[in-house]
Amino acid sequence: MTELLARTVSVAKQGNILVATVDNPPVNALSHSVRSGLIAAVKALESDAEAHAMVIVCDGRTFIAGADIHEFKKPMVAPLLGEVIDTLDAATKPIVAAIHGTALGGGLEVALACSYRIALEGSKVGLPEVKLGILPGSGGTVRLPRLAGVEQALAMISEGGQISARDAQEKGIVDEVVSGDLKEAAIAFTGKVIADGARLRRTSDLPVPAFDAAVLEMSRAALAKKYKGFKAPLVAVDLIKMVTETPVAEAIALEYKTCKELLVSPQSKALRHIFAAEREALKIDGVDAGVKPRDVKKVAIVGPGTMGRGIASCFLNIGIPVTLIGLTDEGLASAVRAIGKIYEGSVKRGSLSSEEMERRMALLTPTTSYDGIADVDLVIEAVTEDMAVKKDVFAKLDAVLRNDAIVATNTSFLDIEELAGSSRNPARVAGMHFFNPANVMKLLENVRAASTAADVLATTTALGKRLGKVPVMVGRSEGFVANRMLSKRTREAQFLLEDGATPLQVDRVLTAFGFPIGPFALADLAGMDIMAAARAARVARMSLREQQCNIVDRLVAAGRLGQKSGAGYYVYDENRKASHDPAVDELLEAHRKERGFTARTISDEEILERCLFAMVNEAAKILDEGAAARPSDIDVIWTNGFGFPTYLGGPMFYADQVGLPKVKAALDKYAGLVGDQYFKPAALIERLVAEGKGFYG
Ligand code: CAA
């Protein structure tokens, strides 16, 4: 008979085993009801003389995936997770955690406080708290090193990665990996535990295994480099050090205190904002959540250039066959070689087997003909950024595709409405804007036209997630959201050079802010010829000052093409290390002289404000036009597309933290200094400031 102990936890008896089942969709998070239910389950176990052991198992897609993040914003209501863990730890009969899906954060802490853990093949465990700017707060840092060793625990806690059940078994975290019916396997396992004398195994009773203290310091240095700007990974090192030196009860109390302090830190607030924002971005404005995505089993990609190759590999990675259409056999052969090279790199690094590489390459069909794609479900065109060329491709596709096949364009700035309008079936046209290199970059800017069918939008979103990308739906807008905002930062960076800043100063300020690379180092990496071509494509739509601000063209004329020619905004040594080049000072001074600018000393504050607030101002216009549905979508775009530090929450979240009145005052100041046409505060900012609100209310 099943007894409901709390809204989300029930128990049932199977012989002498009590089975506690957690059912709290979507991810069985440790909400108040689950916490109360688990304590009640242990009490039921203790009070039932016929029950000799208990299994904790979860319904739905996963074992407990952690604390309930939604409760973080409010004061926690007892019983807290620590009490649940203490109750499990103090149980006088063995408890077995039966893991499927993911046991994460508080979920793994629950499992670690049990006597035994069994896991379904394919499941994963981890302590991902660091990704939310916090650390385990209910014994995770105390128990995991005792089972897996200090080094392994530190790696998992400081980086927040997940490991497979098999790995977890090897590391001593999981006792058995099973396949088939988990509940049955857990009951069988628990039966054996009872037959063996129902031995309790408290993780907290174990000693911390010996370890090399130098490892902690080495990890600290490596983490500081890899997670520059992030606080929690370094605190993790201190915490683990403390745990290895402190008795269990005291260590648990100190761990809790540390976690509580981190929870109210600005970084945690920002990282939790991004976690929620990425999930919110999957909900398409105006499209009912019940709209089913179409099935995508086969795709074609038109255009075997840099983007087409990267996009093709994204699909091959998830086992979807790709027909790659090009104009010439040579172009296709070069694309196939380039895709092969991507995989060869992975095989060399050991992250891919050569068999898997062969499997993926076998899914690729290069062809110069459109004839063989009548049965594909989706085509992505990645041909040259020319409306006429793209329309020609659309016409060819219309002639061969099934009516329900989706046509997506990878355009980065052409008008989506015009493209959709050119199709025989505008409802099937959408944008899927990948970023270069497409096989690496997480951001996928999906674009909607007014005519795009709701299930096509649902498909591009679902597909983005399947491809391991972070998809965000945007609307019609030149450069969409990401590049439109970037172009404003690029423009300001150029104007700052005219006003007297140096490339080094601008890059230093923006990397100190938290961007992984400054705009000028990035331009040198991309290549000045590419930057010049992008500028030429837009020059007719630029303001006069922008048109005349032709520093990029001057660099190209001087043969300074960036890293590839050994010099661009910087000069590069044989190891591609950049240094300041007085020749660039001269080139800039000549430009200023010609253009009538006198260099002045520019403060770091001005550089930061002009670069960031120009973007924020443009984002406000984008929001008002409806090209982005919500400010959080813009934050997701910038943190995933251009390395805006996640611990600052994205440009819109950051602007709210600065305070919109301060942002508006800065915009007004720069409107006076640089020009109204560049810095006049957007109408949305004016309105929000007048209403005493921020982008987030
Ligand atoms: N609390 C509340 N809701 C959560 C949640 C959590 N810990 N984790 C996920 N969800 C919600 C998501 O917001 C989403 O909700 P909507 O459908 O309403 O948008 C839904 O569950 C599904 O999430 P995903 O889209 O991410 O689903 P997925 O299948 O791709 O991934 C997952 C599932 C791997 C569990 C992923 O959601 C995940 O990584 N979750 C976060 C896990 C985590 O960080 N746990 C640690 C929390 S802190 C802690 O536990 C320690 C402590 O006490 C302080």
Image: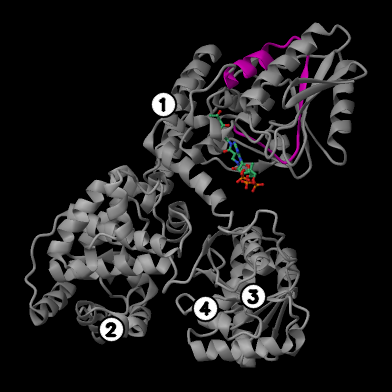
Mark 3 or 2: in front is: 3
Estimate the spatial distance between the alpha carbons at disc 3 and disc 2, rounded to whole Å.
Answer: 43 Å
Looking at the picture, how far across and down is residue 411, in whole percent?
Answer: 51, 77
Quarter placement of the C terminus = top left
Q: Helix or strand or loop: what does disc 4 sit on?
A: helix
First in sequence: mark 2 vs mark 4: 4
Say whether residue 324 is left or right of residue 607: right
N-terminal of the pair, mark 3 or mark 2, is 3
Residue 437, above or below 110: below
What residue is disc 4 on? Answer: 417
Position of residue 383 in the picture relative to residue 99 (left or right): left
Q: Secondary structure at mark 3?
A: helix
Name the residue nearer the viewer: 44 or 685.
Answer: 685
Of residue 210 and residue 397, the one placed in the foreground of this image is 397
Stretch in magenta? 80-105
Find out whether residue 92 is within the magenta segment.
yes
Residue 277 in view in this figure: yes
Q: Do labels 3 and 4 touch, CB within 8 Å?
A: no
- Dot 2 falls on a residue whose secondary structure is helix
Q: Amino acid at mark 1?
A: Glu
Whole-Å distance between the Cαs marked 3 and 4? 11 Å
The residue beneath circle 3 is 427
Mark 3 residue CB less than 8 A from any atom of ligand 1:
no
* Residue type (three-letter) at the residue carrying disc 4: Glu
Q: Position of residue 28 (x, y in %)?
A: 68, 34
CB atoms at circles 1 and 4 under 8 Å apart? no
Label number found at residue 556: 2
Q: Is residue 680 above or below residue 450?
A: above
The quarter of the rendered structure image containing the N terminus is top right
Q: Nearer the observer, disc 2 or disc 4?
A: 4
Which residue lies under the disc numbered 1? Answer: 261
